[in-house]
Image (spheres, rainbow, N blue to C red):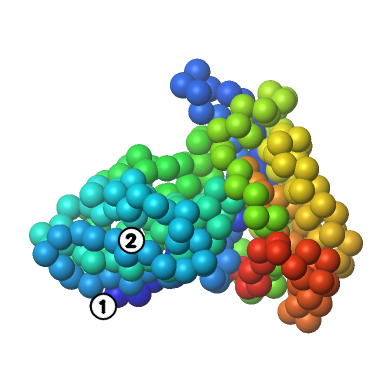
Amino acid sequence: MSVETAYAKINLALHVRRRRDDGYHELETLFAFVDGGDMLSARRAQEDSLTTNGEFAATLNNPFDNIVMQALGTLPRAEGLAVTLEKNLPVAAGLGGGSADAGAIFRIVREMRGLPDDWQERAARLGADVPACVESRTCIGRGTGTDLQPMESDLAGCPVLLVNPRVPMATGPVFAAWSGEDDGPLPQGTAREITMHGTNGLEAPAIALCPEISDVLERLRAADATVARMSGSGATCFALFDSIENRDMASARLHEYRPRWWQMKGLLR
């Protein structure tokens, strides 16, 4: 039996540069990962299979269309894997939940028998965030997000709070609503400096589609956070804090304000 955490992905900064002729967007982003997320366990079996449970399992109603099964299908193996996925992260939430699940499958297969030399290309075919999610370490992503530059993080261990208003946000409409104005390159410097001086160019179009995001951000920014920003294409927002105590106090106040909002507390990896 092999067990892996599918670490929640957040974009500490996300600058959209231009629309490409193929319909995708050139971007620059600082990926980071929280020390919690979905949980996957796998054991050897005659054929691949997937069982789901957890709070958000009901959103995955077609196991054969799930990215976990797609990841299994893209990795050559002599034996099958019976996978159980505990779906703790909301779907279509800007946390790379599906990509994180796929990344965890790559790590499980690597532990059991190793990965093919072209695993990065195989991962990229599953989704732009998947290559970063395989290692789940702080890095800069360019191009569509698949051109990765690893970096040491001076934010490792930083307390973080994730908040989602329980509104799913499809990526396509948010990118389609982007203004088309180049956000410019990421700032230079450490992970902390990039985070503090960067932005998320998708925040405005996402808020136009989901005004609740503005409410989440307003509450986080009033909670003595070091920085509060939307992750990816939304609707999840994150806040970084200088202490676990401040993070937990902010979490408690938010729960009083909106008990139904989804939250996850953690530390940056």
Tell which of 248 and 170 is nearer to you.
Answer: 170
- Identify the disc placed on residue 221: none
Q: Quadrant of residue 17?
A: top right
- Res. 1 mark: 1
State the residue at coordinates (28%, 70%): 42
**Residue 17 position (above or below residue 55):** above
Q: Height in image: 228 above or below 146?
A: below
Give the residue drawn at x 21%, y 64%. Answer: 81
Which residue extends farthest bottom? 245
Residue at 42%, 54% (x, y): give it.
Answer: 60
Secondary element at tag 2: helix
Look at the numbered discs 1 and 2 and tell me whether their residues touch, using CB distance below 8 Å: no
Question: Disc 1 marks which amino acid?
Answer: Met
Q: Residue 105, labelled with which disc? A: 2
Closer to us: 78 or 52: 52
For the question of whether residue 197 can be seen, the reply is: no
**Above/below status of 110 relative to 72:** below
Q: Position of residue 110 (x, y in %)?
A: 27, 64
Q: Say whether residue 266 is left or right of residue 36.
A: right
Q: Is residue 18 left or right of residue 133?
A: right
Report helix, strand or loop for mark 1: loop
| Quarter occupied by residue 33 | bottom right
Kindly identify the amino acid type of the residue bearing the numbered disc 2.
Ile
Q: Position of residue 241 (x, y in %)?
A: 77, 69
Residue 132 is left or right of residue 240, and the answer is: left
Percent coordinates x, y for residue 67 in the rendering = 36, 50
Question: Which comes before the other along the chain, label 1 or label 2?
Answer: 1
Q: How many marks?
A: 2
Image position, residue 80 (x, y; %): 16, 62
Q: What's the CA distance linking mark 1 and mark 2?
A: 13 Å
Image quarter of the N terminus: bottom left
